[in-house]
Image: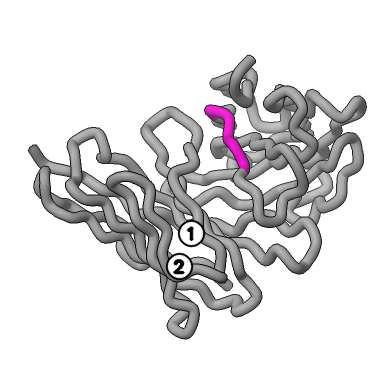
Amino acid sequence: GAGVSQSPRYKVAKRGQDVALRCDPISGHVSLFWYQQALGQGPEFLTYFQNEAQLDKSGLPSDRFFAERPEGSVSTLKIQRTQQEDSAVYLCASSLWVAAGNTIYFGEGSWLTVV
Amino acid sequence: DQQVKQNSPSLSVQEGRISILNCDYTNSMFDYFLWYKKYPAEGPTFLISISSIKDKNEDGRFTVFLNKSAKHLSLHIVPSQPGDSAVYFCAASDTNSGNTPLVFGKGTRLSVIA
């Protein structure tokens, strides 16, 4: 596709349930990012991949959060044992080359509500 | 510790007038700045960027100004149109520190009134 594609668009999870969020970056983009955006806040960095290598995961809020990009294209963000504070929009973004000095392009986001 | 600050949560402007959105940053290593626009239920879309070697970048109705000494940038939209109503995010990065991610402000909601 032409843009970054994310699925599901909307997910309601019961507290304690595991969720998996998928991101298809723009074809050929080397870098892929996950951001979390809570209501009324700006996007907060979670993790970054260059091809299949996870170069930075400093923003992951706890060890319940795990991301992978095994073949350097599609990425999955997994949240185990979801908590109410995990409710947010999870944004995936990609850029053609490395992050620094380049524009990153966002998907529409996966809206997670934990009840 | 917010490194990128957008101190005005909202702004209302009449159609045809100038909209000025402001952004301050604290990290003096930031040298690349971007503005993103976000409509409800959509992801942020890139609007305009500026490198620290410049103090102005213009693209149609949108101009970004950078004042490095004040660690301040602003986005000017002129003339403002109702379709410009959205949340605008300022973002910054340090291109000399490897692959550091973009750091975002909390956003300013712009309402352009017809």
Mark 1: give few (<14), some (14-19) or many (20+) Cα within 10 Å. many
Q: Is residue B24 magenta-colored? A: no
Magenta highlight: main SS: loop
Q: Mark on residue B5? A: 2
Instruction: Report which residue position mark 1 lands on.
Output: B105
Whether tag 2 and tag 1 are in contact, CB under 8 A, the answer is yes
**Above or below, A62 relative to B95:** above
**Label 1 amino acid?**
Gly
Q: Position of residue A67 (x, y in %)?
A: 81, 36
Q: Classify residue A5 as left or right of residue B26.
A: right
Write the residue at 43% across / 82% down.
Answer: B70
Q: CA distance from mark 2 to mark 1?
A: 5 Å
Query: Which residue is located at x 38 percent, y 66 percent?
Result: B65
Whole-percent x, y for residue B54 in the image: 50, 68
Residue A10 x, y percent position in the rendering: 55, 21
Report in which chain the residue with disc 1 lies: B
